[in-house]
Image (spheres, grey):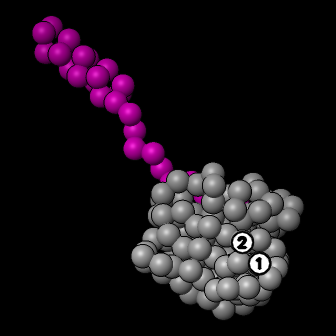
Amino acid sequence: MKTTTALLLITLFLLTLPCAASAATRTVASSGGDYTTIQAAIDAAASGDEVHVAAGTYTENVTMKAGVKLMGGYNSSDWSRDISANVTVIDAGGTGSTVTAAASTLDGFIITGCASAGIVAAYTSITARLR
């Protein structure tokens, strides 16, 4: 009886422990995504999350967040990825830097339209694979 009670108490204790948070995937598209701008998705993301961006041109200046993977080249109808077929562009529109990085991953984009620097990664590391 004491063994059964002890096992029951241990099981109940273990069930009340918080689970590790799992990484989230946030999607960006002009329609059919969680967000319509890349920056809004990054702002909502936490370290370990991925932001998947559908094909298209996004006119904005992007400030990345540490630990967040920003990945372009997605088809917004089924979220399959092909960076050659689904060209994804971040265009700063002639203002500032296109992307400011922060210990993060930038993969599958064309970076254009900057007034100063395309990608700024001062005092940080970035993994970038650009088209």
In the image shown, does 10 or 70 lie closer to the viewer?
70
Q: Secondary structure at mark 1?
A: loop
Residue 64 colored in magenta in the image: no
Q: Residue furthest left?
A: 2
Residue 20 colored in magenta in the image: yes
Q: Secondary structure at mark 2?
A: loop
Q: Position of residue 6 (x, y in %)?
A: 17, 16
For the record, the magenta segment spans 1-27
Compared with 68, 121 (above or below) is below
Which of the two labelled residues, at mark 1 and mark 2, occupies the earlier sequence position?
2
Residue indicated by mark 1: 95
Q: Position of residue 129 (x, y in %)?
A: 56, 87
Q: Amino acid at mark 1?
A: Thr
Q: Is residue 48 left or right of residue 18?
A: right
In the image shown, does 58 or 18 lie closer to the viewer?
58
Residue indicated by mark 2: 61
Please tell me which residue is depicted at 72% across the width and 71% down the height of the picture: 61
